[in-house]
Amino acid sequence: MNQDSFILIQIVVPMALVFLLVYKYIDVRTKTTHFVCPACRSRFKLSKKEFAFARKTGVINERVATCPVCNYKGSMPFMKD
Ligand SMILES: [Zn+2]
């Protein structure tokens, strides 16, 4: 096996797989869940990009997000649609 194909198999392929898995996870999450704002009770969805960069709070099914209705920013739970 030459050096190039070694790098491809050991590094590039696993990285691509991880990226695809993360992308798929975010895709499914954003499609099947919604956030509920604790301040105004409105329900909203985050885009894939917003969800990917939303900070985790340490609590399962909770992220730091900004409500598009009242602009409240803080940790809020997300749940299945
Ligand atoms: Zn709100």
Image (tube, rainbow, N blue to C red):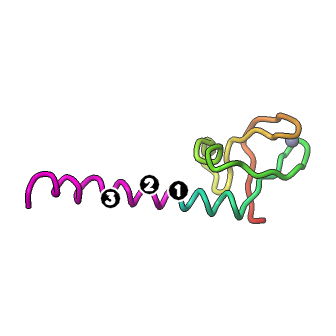
Q: Quadrant of residue 81?
A: bottom right
Location of mark 3 (residue): 14
Q: Nearer the viewer, residue 23 or 42?
A: 23
* Separation (CA) of disc 1 from disc 2: 6 Å
Q: Is residue 20 left or right of residue 35?
A: left
Q: Nearer the viewer, residue 17 or 81?
A: 17
Location of mark 2 (residue): 19
Q: Position of residue 25 (x, y in %)?
A: 56, 61
Dot 2: what SS?
helix
Q: Is residue 76 left or right of residue 4?
A: right
Over which residues does the magenta segment extend?
1-22
Packing grade of label 3 (10 A; few <14, some 14-19, many >=20) is: few
Identified at 8% across, 56% down, the residue is 2
Is residue 15 one of those drawn in magenta?
Answer: yes
Location of mark 1 (residue): 23
Question: Answer yes or no: do the residues labelled 1 and 2 have beta carbons within 8 Å?
Answer: yes
Q: Quadrant of residue 66?
A: top right
Question: Answer yes or no: do the residues labelled 2 and 3 have beta carbons within 8 Å?
Answer: no
Q: Position of residue 77 (x, y in %)?
A: 74, 52
